[in-house]
């Protein structure tokens, strides 16, 4: 079993590569749900849906999120009623949230509802929310505290991020299926998602970090793929977020951010010069092409990361 | 103030004619909400929306219900998830229900939410739900008891209707604004809606029939337009429903059904031979062309009915 930790678009793309590279039923993807929010009474789970649509081959490749060919009629009508409707939720995408909301209201846990939706779309990897308990990433910014989607979508991550807290995390435990997957993990892959805004929430829910450390102790290497190439984020505000937290916007900063969690880190050729310093931290560097331009790139990178993890695992005493 | 009682498509069309014929702010339309139901967690009010869209000039003229040019993407996605999704709710139409549901959940009464939605779409007539309390028309059929939409849409009103009951009617009172409108009504127009399935629910909520009778006592004539022409319903199962209740499928049956409520009844030239028998019941017949083919027809019929009501009002002692 390979376990991936993922946020949105970048995480979804590597998860897709891993799903293509691995046999069916041997990949579990644990996804950030700190971005989840209620919008027009619907429970919207942006990262779960991005990963689900990507794994199902239904994602809008241009944006990375949403469904290919989706339409925007419902939102147009909401605007006709004078609503702001700032969150882009296409008509088909809305159906996902509608169905999820109905099933959650009927008392089913998010992990079960997610499994049902993903199976209906033909996803063979195991898609897992980090927790069945709602938590909310609250971003402290120069403009005040904002929910994640207010910060990210409504205000287009223009505000400086001072800090992040996860509302409700005290009472949120990791989803049972996520802990079970980690207990039998041969490797844990931290996808190139935002370390502060996407991966930290995943690791913050009760029992998750301990389970990753447990997998590591049991011999499963923990390998991250850098979300930063040449000082810039492929997508989103990760570079600025790391700097605001006192870390360099580089693979070295990423290695330092994850600290003793990591056994290895994949970084881009553009950052090859940082490999010695990363190695000096006790993190094995894998220098390769980490930009995923298309599905072939995703699979190639996934295979390289899996081989790297296998090598690290084999090198263990 | 003219007050109209309406169900869905037929009611909406006459209401539209009345709105065109009358000055702004002098028409209140009290609409059946017995057909309302919860669908995918959304509060759907088919008759209210049909009347609202028609008055706003946004209705799908071919079907009579739904929005012109609406799309069906969300429902297609629901089906992809394995859902039956039998109720046609277009993408734009879904936005209406989404917004209504959110506002209802926030504690606002349906009459207020309806007024807000209608105003946003430019409706100048006052659109009123019969009650702010949810009630549900349950149809006893040869196939067992069915909710209205199961009977009407899902099973395409193919089952014989034995009886109808309005679940929750004991605790449902007429919306305050509906009673206020009736208290100042100069005429009450019962639209050509299904007498059993659409108008009876309106008259059944607490205080409504008494308020109509009160308006009548105060000099406001109550005039219905027959939903039956030449033994057939223009749209829907009204003919069969009347017969199953022991009434003729004709304007005479309609006059007998409404009984002492009516002062006048508009019927079609096709049924002119029944005028003497209708008159013998104490109901003044208006024989005219009652089929509404287009907006001009609606306005023409509305003017004739208003003139007829004015004549009846003037003839009162």
Image (cartoon, coloured by chain):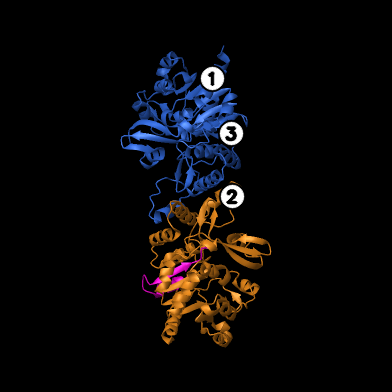
Chain colours: A orange, B blue
Question: Which quarter of the image is occupied by the N terminus of chain A?
Answer: bottom left
Q: Is residue B262 above or below residue B24?
A: above
- The answer to whether marks 1 and 2 sit on the same chain is no
**Residue depicted at 56% across the width and 43% down the height:** B107
- Give the label, 1 or 2, closer to the camera: 1
Q: CA distance from mark 1 to mark 2?
A: 42 Å
Residue extending furthest left?
A: B142
Q: CA distance from mark 3 to mark 1?
A: 21 Å
Residue A83: horizontal and vertical position, in percent?
60, 49
Chain-order first, disc 3 or disc 1: 3
Residue designated by label 3? B126
- The answer to whether marks 2 and 3 sit on the same chain is no
Q: Quadrant of residue A19?
A: bottom left
Mark 1 element type: helix
**Residue depicted at 50% across the width and 44% down the height:** B68
Residue A309: horizontal and vertical position, in percent?
44, 81
Question: Which quarter of the image is occupied by the C terminus of chain A?
Answer: bottom left
Q: Do labels 3 and 1 touch, CB within 8 Å?
A: no
Does the stretch in magenta take in A30?
yes
Crowding at label 1, few (<14), some or many (≥20) Cα neighbours within 10 Å?
A: many
- The answer to whether marks 3 and 1 sit on the same chain is yes
Residue designated by label 2? A79
């Amino acid at each position: 079993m390979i376990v991936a930790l993922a946020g949105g678009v970048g995480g979804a793309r590597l998860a897709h590569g891993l799903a293509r590279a691995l046999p069916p039923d041997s990949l579990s993807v644990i996804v950030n749900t700190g971005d989840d929010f209620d919008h027009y009474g619907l429970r919207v789970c942006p990262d779960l849906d991005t990963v689900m649509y990507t794994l199902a081959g239904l994602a809008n490749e241009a944006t990375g999120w949403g469904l290919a060919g989706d339409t925007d009629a419902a939102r147009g009508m909401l605007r006709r009623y004078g609503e702001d409707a700032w969150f882009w939720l296409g008509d088909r995408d809305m159906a996902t949230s509608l169905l999820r909301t109905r099933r959650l209201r009927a008392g089913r846990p998010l992990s079960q509802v997610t499994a049902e939706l993903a199976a209906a779309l033909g996803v063979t990897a195991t898609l897992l929310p980090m927790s069945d308990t709602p938590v909310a990433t609250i971003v402290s910014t120069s403009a005040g505290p904002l929910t994640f989607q207010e910060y990210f979508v409504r205000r287009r991550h223009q505000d400086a991020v001072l800090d992040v807290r996860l509302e409700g995390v005290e009472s949120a435990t990791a989803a049972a299926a996520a802990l079970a997957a980690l207990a039998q993990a041969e490797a844990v892959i931290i996808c190139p998602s935002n370390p502060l805004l996407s991966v930290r929430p995943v690791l913050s829910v009760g029992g998750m970090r301990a389970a990753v450390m447990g997998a590591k102790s049991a011999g499963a290497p923990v390998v991250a793929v850098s979300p930063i190439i040449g000082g810039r984020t492929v997508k989103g505000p990760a570079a600025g977020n790391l700097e605001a937290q006192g870390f360099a916007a580089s693979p070295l900063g990423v290695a330092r951010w994850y600290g003793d969690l990591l056994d290895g880190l994949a970084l881009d050729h553009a950052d090859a010069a940082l490999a010695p310093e990363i190695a000096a931290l006790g993190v094995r560097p894998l220098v390769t092409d980490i930009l995923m331009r298309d599905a072939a790139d995703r699979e190639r990178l996934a295979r390289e990361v899996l081989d790297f993890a296998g090598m690290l695992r084999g090198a263990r005493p």
